[in-house]
């Protein structure tokens, strides 16, 4: 990956309800940061667009901090065209409050329900834009799917819908899986139909496997 440009999203996003409350998820960013560290060790020019985490910046990675899904999209949108590989490892919030108060909502003043609206689908936006490019001139797109059931079917549908070359399907609900864990139970699915079960694997080791597949995809530009 020496000299290759690699963009990685990581961590959660936070969508404000008011001045102190947010909609978010328990993502720690471990997977994305492991990927950034491994890619930098391989000589890549790494841009890490990260939601709020407690993790240190991997050596050699350029860190860009964001909070909301819209902010993450702004940073990705302005950079994706120059990348060789893009890995969508962030746990981006799917919804945000339709209205956010600039002040803290007092408990006695809170509504019984909160109206939500979808956030921007960053991976889908990039995938759609890539379709207008000739094969071999598109970045390698790699995504993730965390599923508790119908793992392969759901992940395969996501791969096709968003134009990924590879999707990392993580079966959550097992011991040692899920947000904050150091391991994942993984099935790798490729655009050509290949399925590679890895079982329970450390995220640091998984990062190396994912980057190996990215290198293969760059050498065979069918993405």
Image: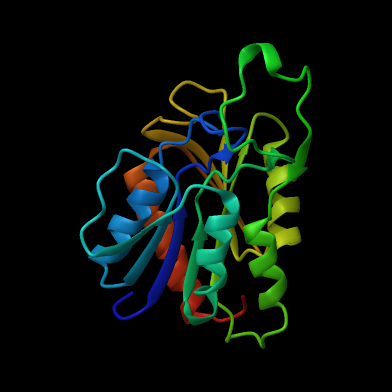
Image location (x, y in percent) of residue 73: 58, 61
To which quarter of the image does residue 166 belong?
bottom right
Q: Nearer the viewer, residue 102 or 47?
A: 102
Residue 132 screen position, x and y as percent: 72, 83
Q: At 28% from the left edge and 63% from the top edge, which residue is drawn?
A: 61
Q: Residue drawn at (47%, 80%), measured in percent from left and top?
A: 219
Which residue of the protein is positioned furthest toward the top in this rendering?
108
User: In the image, 95: left or right of 78?
Assistant: right
The image position of residue 63, as x and y in percent, is 33, 59
User: Where the C terminus falls, by quadrant?
Assistant: bottom right
Task: Answer with left or right where residue 216 lies relative to residue 119.
Answer: left
Number of numbered markers:
0
Which quadrant would residue 2 be assigned to in this image?
bottom left
Q: Is residue 221 above or below residue 202?
A: below
The residue drawn where x is 28% and y is 56% is 37
Image quarter hosting the N terminus: bottom left
């Amino acid at each position: 990956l020496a000299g290759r440009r690699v963009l990685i999203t990581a961590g959660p996003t936070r969508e404000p309800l008011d001045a102190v409350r947010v909609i978010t998820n328990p993502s720690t960013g471990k997977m994305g940061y492991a990927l950034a560290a491994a890619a930098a060790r391989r000589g890549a020019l790494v841009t890490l667009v990260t939601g709020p985490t407690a993790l240190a910046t991997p050596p050699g990675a350029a860190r860009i901090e964001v909070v909301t899904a819209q902010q993450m999209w702004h940073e990705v949108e302005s950079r994706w065209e120059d990348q060789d590989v893009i890995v969508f490892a962030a746990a981006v919030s799917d919804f945000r409050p339709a209205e956010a108060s600039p002040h803290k909502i007092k408990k006695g003043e809170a509504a019984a329900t909160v109206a939500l609206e979808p956030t921007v689908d960053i991976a889908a936006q990039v995938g759609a834009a890539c379709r207008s490019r000739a094969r071999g001139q598109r970045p390698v797109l790699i995504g993730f799917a965390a599923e508790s059931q119908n793992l392969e079917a759901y992940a395969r549908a996501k791969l096709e819908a968003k134009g990924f070359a590879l999707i990392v399907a993580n079966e959550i609900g097992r011991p040692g899986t899920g947000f904050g864990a150091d391991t994942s139970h993984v099935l790798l699915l490729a655009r050509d139909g290949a399925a590679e079960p890895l079982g329970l694997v450390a995220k640091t080791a998984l990062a190396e496997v994912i980057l190996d597949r990215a290198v293969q995809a760059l050498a065979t530009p069918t993405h």
